[in-house]
């Protein structure tokens, strides 16, 4: 669900995730290494890796199930911890 107080927009199909990350970088005028993608799927991780930005996994998702040793957050309040100690 879109929460306009938290997000400037929500991107999805038909564009792929890497294309969406590029659109965000252009709009925000930043480089991939200045961005973080938060996601729950393996495809989210792969898109972040292909684009060159940091990936933070959400603990309730297919990525965490497939890679249980990877650091993950239960809520967005924990993201800052990952930034201090990235895996």
Image: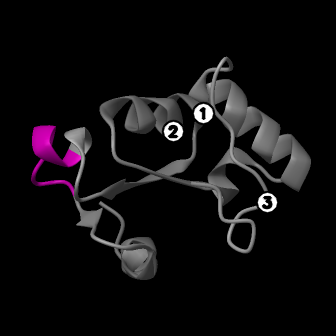
Label at residue 8: 3
For marks 1 and 2, give the CA distance: 5 Å
Circles 2 and 3, Cβ within 8 Å, touching? The answer is no
Please identify the quarter of the rendering in which residue 87 is found.
Answer: bottom left
Label at residue 51: 1
Lateral position of residue 65 relative to residue 20, left or right: left
Q: Mark 2 sits on what residue? A: 48
For marks 1 and 3, give the CA distance: 20 Å
Counting residues from the start of the chain, the first of labels 2 and 3 encountered is 3
Tell me what residue is drawn at x 24 percent, y 41 percent: 63
**Residue 52 forms part of the magenta stretch:** no
Say which of 4 and 32 sits in front.
Answer: 4
Lateral position of residue 54 relative to residue 24, left or right: left
Question: Would you say residue 11 is visible in this rendering?
Answer: yes
Q: Which image quarter is the N terminus in?
A: bottom right
Residue 72: horizontal and vertical position, in percent? 26, 62
Question: Would you say residue 29 is visible in this rendering?
Answer: no
Circle 3 sits in a helix, a strand or a loop, which is it? loop
Crowding around mark 1 (Cα neighbors within 10 Å: few <14, some 14 to 19, many 20+) is many
Circles 1 and 3, Cβ within 8 Å, touching? The answer is no
Tell me what residue is drawn at x 76 percent, y 52 percent: 9
Mark 2 or 3: in front is: 3
Say which of 33 and 22 sits in front.
Answer: 22
Say which of 10 and 28 sits in front.
Answer: 10
Residue 46: horizontal and vertical position, in percent? 42, 30
């Amino acid at each position: 669900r879109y929460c306009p107080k938290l997000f400037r927009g929500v991107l999805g199909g038909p564009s792929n995730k890497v294309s969406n990350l590029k659109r965000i970088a252009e709009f925000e005028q930043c480089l991939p290494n200045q961005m973080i993608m938060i996601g729950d799927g393996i495809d989210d991780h792969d898109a972040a890796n292909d684009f060159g930005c940091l990936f933070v996994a959400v603990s309730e998702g297919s990525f965490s199930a497939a890679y249980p040793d990877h650091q993950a957050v239960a809520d967005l309040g924990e993201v800052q911890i990952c930034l201090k100690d990235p895996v």
